[in-house]
Amino acid sequence: MERALSGSVDSRASLHTVNSINAAQLAARLESYESGEKKSISDVRRTFCLFVTFDLLFITLLWIIELNVDGGIEKQLSKEVLYYDYHSSFFDIFVLAVFRFTLLILAYAVCKLRHWWAIAITTAVTSAFLIVKVIISKLLTQGAFGYLLPIMSFVLAWIETWFLDFKVLPQEMEDENRFQSVPDASERAVLIQPGPLSDGQFYSPPESVADSDEETEEKQDHEKPVL
C-alpha cells in the first residue's frame, strides 16, 4: 500500500514537472514571437527593401557610365535632361527607377503594406513604358547601353515582383499564423495542469484469497514438528 502510494505521488510529481517545463517552453516561444512582432520591419521585408535600393543604385550607375562614355557627363546631362528627347534619352529610365524606389519604399517600408497592389503598379508601369520605348525610340542604335539599360530595368522590376509575392508576403503570413497559434497552445497547457491530489486517486488492489490460503498452508507446514 505504501509503495503504491509513493509510486502514485512520484508519477504525479513527474507529470507536474513535465507540464511546468512545457508551459515554460511555450512562454519562451510566446515571448520570442512577441519580440519579433514588435520589430519595426521583418527580416525578409528588409531584404526586399535593400533589393529595391539596389535597383535604383544599379540603374543610376549604368546611366552615369553611359553619360561618361559619350563625351563627358556635363554635356550629356544637358543633352538628356535639359533637351530631353524620348527617342534617344536614357533619363526617363532613371526616372522610372526613382519612381519604383519611391513607391515601393513608401508602401512596404514606411506604411508596411501587406498587399501586392503597389508592386503591381510599379511593374505594370515599368513594363509598358519600356516596351513602348524600345519599339518607338532609337535606343537600339546607340550601342550596348541601348540594350543594357532597358533590359536590366525590366528584369529588376520583375524580380522585385517575384520576391515580394513568393517570399515576403507568404513568409510574413506564416509567421503571423504561428504567432497566433502560440497563445492557444499556452492556454491549453494551462488547462491541463494537474490539480491537487485526492485520496480517490490512489488505489491498491485487494489481496488475493488464493494467495493467502497458500501462505497459511506454508506456515502450517513449517510449524509441524520434525519427526
Image (tube, grey):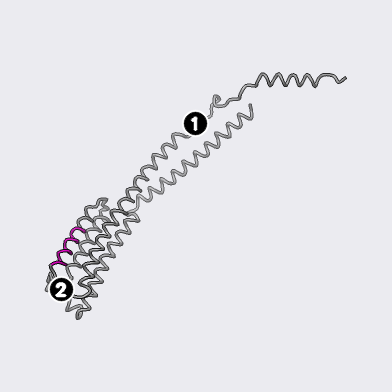
Viewer-closest of 142 and 197: 142
**Magenta region includes residue 193:** no
* The residue stretch that appears in magenta: 122-135
Amino acid at dot 1: Gly
Viewer-closest of 16 and 211: 211
Q: Is residue 138 left or right of residue 217?
A: left
Kindly state the secondary structure of the residue where label 1 is placed: loop
User: Which numbered disc covers residue 142?
Assistant: none
> Does 179 appear above or below 215?
below
User: Which numbered disc covers residue 80?
Assistant: 2
Q: Residue at x 38, y 47 (%)?
A: 34
Q: Is residue 75 left or right of residue 185?
A: left
Amino acid at dot 2: Glu
Q: Give the CA distance from mark 1 to mark 2.
A: 80 Å
Q: Quadrant of residue 53?
A: bottom left
Dot 1 or dot 2: first in sequence order is: 2
Kindly state the secondary structure of the residue where label 2 is placed: helix
Instruction: Rate crowding at label 2 as few (under 14), some (14 to 19) or many (20 or more) other CA atoms within 10 Å.
Output: some
Q: Residue at x 65, y 21 (%)?
A: 208
Q: Which x, y percent locates residue 165?
A: 28, 53
> Does 203 appear above or below 137?
above
Q: Residue at x 23, y 65 (%)?
A: 153
In this view, the residue farthest toward the right is 227
Quadrant where the C terminus sits is: top right
Q: Which x, y percent locates residue 115?
A: 25, 51
Viewer-closest of 147 and 116: 147
Residue bearing the label numbered 1: 195
Q: Which x, y percent locates residue 16?
A: 52, 36
**Magenta region includes residue 133:** yes
In this view, the residue farthest toward the bottom is 71
Q: Are marks 1 and 2 in contact (CB under 8 Å)?
A: no
